[in-house]
Amino acid sequence: MALVENLINGTGFQKIQFEKIERLERLRYEILRTLSPSTSQNFINIDLYRRKLAKMKDKQINYEMIKLLKKNDISEKIINSCPKIVKKLSGSKIFLQRRAHVIIKTPGNKNTKTLPHYEMMSGISPYTYIIWAPLHDLEGDDGGIYYLDQRKSLSIIKKEEKLYGFANGEITLNTKVNLKKIQIKFGEAIIFNPFVMHGNNFFKSSLARIAINVRFQSANKPLLQKDTDYFKYLKLN
């Protein structure tokens, strides 16, 4: 099934390949240099940094994340690494999340689990797409990422609305998910629509997981609660 058709009427999510991986490589380098300034100018081993993160306490990781406040161009650099895909979905004039999220997850039961959720819960519009990309390969049990296809996601939402008159409550948040982990390599991403339920399960690894995600939609479509405080206008070349 073609990408657009699948994201609208199919599973609601799909693995994609970045078209301009060299741009993504440069962005990874810039992020790592910001997080770890002592990194050699000519050599990056992201797994060494991931191993270091895995041993850090929450307070230390928070301090690491604050370093990224100086970088306000991550969103554009992600989008410009896959411009053809973005144009196909939303055209060349888009609303783009002002600051992309860089997420660090450390192994173990304490930090890795995220309850099932979908992006509409946060007030973005139904025309929004989300790109989620790890900054390294995710194989074996070091990922923990899962997605429920759109049909199952909507059935859970509708069931809760029918029973209680609202969604986003206990049925959604307590959905039991036991799916095969998604295997994904650096240079690939998952793109999904805002109705797809997703989250993280516990994972076992000696390395932390570092990923980036960003949201965008057509500038010709209406915004909801997340408006221009959250999004900015961007015209793609």
Image: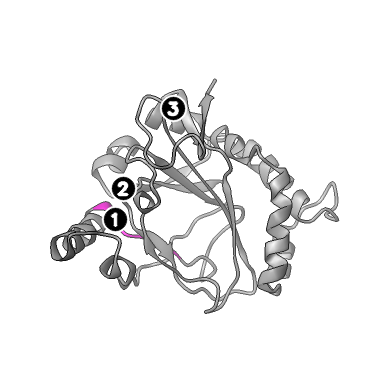
Cα separation, mark 1 vs mark 3, equals: 24 Å
Amino acid type, label 1: Asp
Q: CA distance from mark 2 to mark 3?
A: 18 Å
Q: Residue at x 28, y 40 (%)?
A: 8
Q: Quadrant of the C terminus?
A: top right
Q: In the rendered image, which residue does mark 3 sit on?
A: 87
Magenta highlight on residue 146: yes
Q: Earlier in the sequence, mark 2 or mark 1?
A: 2
In this rendering, the count of numbered labels is 3
Marks 1/3 in contact by CB < 8 Å: the verdict is: no
Give the quarter of the image for residue 169: bottom left
Report the span colored magenta: 145-150
Residue tagged 1 = 149
Q: Give coordinates of residue 44: x percent, y percent.
A: 77, 53
Question: Could you tell me if the residues under marks 2 and 3 are in contact, i.e. CB atoms within 8 Å?
Answer: no
Horizontal side of residue 43 vs 82, given as left or right: right
Q: Give x and y (percent) for residue 128.
A: 38, 39
Within 10 angstroms of label 3, few (less than 14), some, or many (20 or more) residues? some
Q: Secondary structure at mark 2?
A: loop
Q: Which residue is mark 2?
A: 12
Left or right, 12 with respect to 237, comes to left
Residue lying farthest to the bottom in this orientation: 109
